[in-house]
Structure formats: structure tokens, C-alpha cells
């Protein structure tokens, strides 16, 4: 019985839901619309199923880098508390030194917090942004840049990704 329950849980976590729709925007980008969020990404990239942490990875076919998104639990925590928790979780996994958090209000009306992780060579290979709506609902987004040479193009992709990210209506 435990094996069946575990298999059902795995299927639930790793499948693309019927609610997921990918729309080609005909400008080099596509929009992923789920029951939880919508976001735009480069057309032709693969959208991976949600992993055990609830994160979706979107990456080019050659898997040289990735952009990630996941819905975080609603929170009334301060940005400093959210940053500290997020930074701790990330640096435990991948290491690096934070560039420090930057706060701002997005054009969408949501508040945001962003930072980069700088590797030993001084390269900001990983970038993160969390947006929070007025109800405390949050989206966590991240980018891992393949190489320094890819930074400009990947930063353009991540800017489009973060500027178009929307939480689904309740």
C-alpha cells in the first residue's frame, strides 16, 4: 500500500498538469500558463515537470543553463527574513557569496527582492528574484548562466521572464 501511495505522489509531483498551456508568442518567446502562474521564456526551450520542491525548470535543449520558477507559501515575513531564508537554502546547495539584496516595486505592482550569487572567480553565475503580491503570495525565480560569454543574452531572457511572471488569480 505504501508503494502505491508513493507512486501516486511521484506521478502527481512530476507530471505536467492538464492546466499547463504553452503559447507561442511569435516573437521568439512562448508563454507557460499554469494553474499557479504564467511566465514567458525563449521558444523551443524545454519546460520540465515540477520537482519534489515544487520548482519548474525551463532550459535550452542542450541543458547548458536553466531558469527556474516556483510558488512559495504566502508570507508576512519581512524582505530581510525572506532573503535570509532563501540565501541560506541556496548557499547550502551551491555555495557562493551574495551581492546583497535589492528591493523595488515592479511595473506589475508587486514588490520584489533580487540578488546574485558570486562565484570564486567574481562571476555572478546565479541570479534570483522573488516577487510578492499584496496578499503575501510569492514567486521565486532563478537563473543559472552557462558561461560569462552567455551573460548578456541570458540576462535578457531572465529580464523578460521576471517582468512577465504573474501569479494566477485566486
Image (cartoon, rainbow, N blue to C red):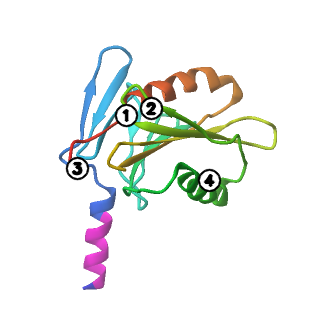
- Residue 161: in magenta span: no
Q: CA distance from mark 2 to mark 1?
A: 5 Å
Q: Residue at x 44, y 29 (%)?
A: 106
Label 1 to label 3, Cα distance in Å? Answer: 19 Å
Magenta stretch bounds? 2-10
Q: Are marks 2 and 1 in contact (CB under 8 Å)?
A: yes
Q: Which mark is residue 17?
A: 3
**Quadrant of the image containing the N terminus:** bottom left
| Separation of marks 3 and 2 at Cα, in angstroms | 22 Å
Whether residue 106 is situated above or below residue 7 in the rendered picture: above
> Mark 2 or mark 4, which has the lower sequence index?
4
Mark 1 or 4 closer to N-term? 4
Q: What residue sits right under mark 2 in the picture?
A: 162
Residue at numbered disc 4: 87
Residue closer to the observer: 152 or 2: 152
Kindly report the distance in space between the C-alpha atoms of the residues bearing marks 1 and 4. Answer: 21 Å
How far from the left and from the top, in percent, is residue 91? 66, 55
Q: How far is disc 4 from disc 3 in space, using C-alphas?
A: 30 Å
Amino acid at each position: 500500500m505504501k508503494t502505491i501511495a508513493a507512486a501516486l505522489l511521484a506521478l502527481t509531483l512530476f507530471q505536467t498538469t492538464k492546466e499547463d498551456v504553452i503559447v507561442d508568442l511569435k516573437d521568439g518567446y512562448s508563454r507557460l500558463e499554469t494553474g499557479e502562474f504564467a511566465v514567458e521564456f525563449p521558444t523551443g526551450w524545454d519546460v520540465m515537470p515540477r520537482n519534489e520542491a515544487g520548482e519548474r525548470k525551463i532550459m535550452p535543449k542542450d541543458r547548458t543553463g536553466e531558469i527556474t520558477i516556483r510558488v512559495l507559501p504566502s508570507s508576512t515575513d519581512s524582505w530581510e527574513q525572506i532573503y535570509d531564508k532563501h540565501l541560506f537554502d541556496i548557499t547550502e546547495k551551491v555555495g557562493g557569496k551574495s551581492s546583497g539584496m535589492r528591493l523595488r516595486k515592479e511595473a506589475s505592482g508587486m514588490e520584489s527582492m533580487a540578488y546574485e550569487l558570486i562565484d570564486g572567480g567574481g562571476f555572478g553565475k546565479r541570479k534570483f528574484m522573488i516577487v510578492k503580491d499584496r496578499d503575501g503570495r510569492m514567486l521565486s525565480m532563478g537563473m543559472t548562466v552557462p558561461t560569462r560569454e552567455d551573460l548578456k543574452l541570458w540576462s535578457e531572457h531572465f529580464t523578460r521572464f521576471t517582468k512577465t511572471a504573474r501569479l494566477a488569480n485566486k
